[in-house]
Image (cartoon, grey):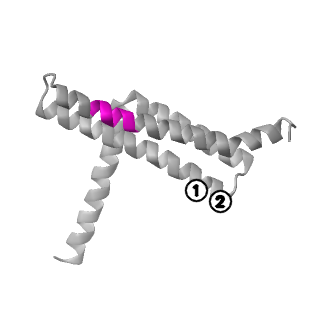
């Protein structure tokens, strides 16, 4: 395969990936909530001047939530396409995937509190 064809294939991969992100944001209200939470966390991180290690933790948990939400959406779309009627096992699979998003979201909130709470206390003069 020529280098030009390989490069074109890589560009297509990015195009498909960005299309998937667009589908996620347009079709999933919870993804838009995650977007708002991401903006709030990034704004707080910049405003408080958090350390590189703290940024690493925040970015990791944000990524975990986004990945969980994307995989949950992919599972839902595939399940609905393959078996549109209610099926108990598909329902359980969807519930488990939704549970993964909840676990990631709760974990990210805990990390957010651990990282930002001391800065909040300092901002109000309690530390």
Quarter of the picture holding the C terminus: top right
Query: Label 1 belongs to which residue?
Result: 56
Q: Check if mark 1's residue and mark 2's residue have beta carbons within 8 Å.
A: yes
| Element marked by disc 2 | helix
Horizontally, is 124 left or right of 41 in the view? right
Q: Is residue 85 above or below residue 18?
A: above
Residue 121 or 92: which is nearer the viewer?
Answer: 92
Residue drawn at x 25%, y 34% as measured from the top left: 93
The magenta region covers: 94-100
Where residue 28 sits in the image (x, y, percent)?
Answer: 36, 30
Please report the residue visible at 76 percent of the width from the left and 43 percent of the height from the top: 119
- Can residue 23 be seen in the rendering of this structure? no
Membership of 97 in magenta stretch: yes
Read off the residue under disc 2. 52
Q: Is residue 70 magenta?
A: no
Q: Residue at x 53, y 34 (%)?
A: 36
- Circle 1: element type: helix
- From what the image shows, is residue 57 above or below residue 10? above
Expressed as whole percent of the image width and height from the top left, the position of residue 91 reads 23, 27
């Amino acid at each position: 395969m020529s280098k030009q064809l390989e490069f074109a294939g890589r560009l297509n991969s990015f195009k498909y990936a960005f299309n998937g992100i667009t589908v996620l944001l347009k079709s999933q209200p919870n993804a838009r909530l995650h977007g708002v939470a991401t903006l709030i966390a990034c704004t707080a991180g910049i405003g408080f001047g958090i350390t590189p290690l703290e940024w690493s933790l925040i970015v990791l948990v944000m990524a975990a939530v986004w990945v969980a939400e994307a995989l949950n959406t992919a599972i839902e779309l595939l399940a609905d396409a393959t078996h549109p009627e209610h099926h108990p096992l598909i329902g359980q699979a969807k519930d488990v995937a939704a549970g993964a998003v909840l676990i990631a979201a709760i974990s990210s909130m805990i990390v957010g509190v651990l990282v930002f709470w001391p800065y909040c206390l300092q901002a109000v003069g309690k530390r």
